[in-house]
Each structure stands twice: as C-alpha cells, then as structure tokens.
Image (cartoon, rainbow, N blue to C red):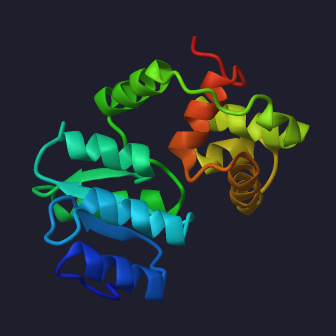
Amino acid sequence: MRVIGEAANGREALRFAADTHPDVILMDIQMPELDGVKATQNILEIDPSAKVIMITMYRQDRYVFEAVKAGARGYVLKDADSATLLDAIRRVAAGEALLNPDMAQNVLDDFRDKREELPQEKHNDLNERETMILKLLAQGFSNQDIALRLDISEKTVRNRLSEIFTKLQLNNRTQAALYAIREGIAPLE
C-alpha cells in the first residue's frame, strides 16, 4: 500500500483524484471549499469506478448516508485503529462495500421510499451468468464466494461485475444490490 497524495480541501481532492486515479480514496466528510459528499459526487462523475471511503467522527452522520447514496463504498470512523483502516482499504479495493446493518437498512428504506420510476427491465440486457452474479452479490456474497459458487475465477467475477455496472448504469456494489432487490432479482427473505 502506498499513499500517493493528500488534499487540504474538497476541490483539491477532486483535482488530485482526476489527475491520479488512485485505487482507493479516503475522503474526510467535513472539508473546506467542497465537503466530502460533494467531492465524492464530483469524483464519481469523472471516474465512476472510483472507490471512496468516507472518514467521519460519527457513525450515524447524515452526510455519511448522503455520501453512500452518492456512491461512496462505505465509511470508517476517525478514531478507528490502523488495523481497521487497513482492512477497510483492502476490502474496498477488492470491491466490497462497508456498511453496518443500521446504515444498510437506512439505504434500503430510502430506496423503497423513492417514488421515481427507473426504466423497467434494464436487467433484460444481462445474460444468465450476469444475472446469477448480480443475485449472489445482492445476497451478500463476496467476489471470492461468488467465484467459488459459480466455479469461475475471482477476476472473472470482477470483470462481469464491471460489465453489469455498465449495462445497468450503476456505480458500485451497493447500488447493484439495491437494484437487484428492487427488481426482484434477489428478493428480500
């Protein structure tokens, strides 16, 4: 692991991320000029595959919820020990999302409350294997577990997920899982 840069404010973080495309971005939620939520939104508009972890003082910070809805992969508390932080970075780099059950429930509730209609049947563009991968993702399986269940390599799972995200116009695993639940691909039990 190598730190390739540091930004003093949100605008600087946006410029640096656009120039360097880091593997994982640790984003302070409260920054001058452009807060972490807006900076994350802007970074993901430039690079939809960016992996952002929000850094916050509070577990239930409303900004964290907004950042996750905007595409952040999760969050870590500022007082987390180094082992927790390193684990979070590794997990997000591997494609996982970091949401505790309360945050996940908040996201699901918000998703259910939306009245706007997404274009129907976008998942018809998915083949049978992609649909199965999406279903397993929504059921909470890691890339490694999906690979084992489908007898394919973990790299193939990552590639298929990237294709699924593109086809469905989604940014990350959390959005894909919510989509699969909403569309009945992976019903809540």
Quarter residue 127 falls in: top right
- Which is more toward the observer, 181 or 113? 113
- Which is more toward the observer, 24 or 16? 16
Residue at 28%, 77% (x, y): give it.
11
142, above or below 37, in the image? above
Where residue 20 appears, x then y in whole percent? 45, 87
Residue at 64%, 43% (x, y): give it.
145
> Does the image show residue 1?
no
Residue at 13%, 71% (x, y): give it.
32
Where residue 14 appears, x then y in whole percent? 36, 77
Q: Which residue lies furthest to the top in this view?
A: 189
Whether residue 49 sits left or right of residue 2 in the image: it is: right
Q: Quadrant of the N terminus?
A: bottom left
> Does the image show residue 163?
yes
Whether residue 124 sits left or right of residue 12 in the image: it is: right
Where residue 63 appears, x then y in whole percent? 23, 46
Q: Quadrant of the C terminus?
A: top right
131, above or below 164, in the image? above
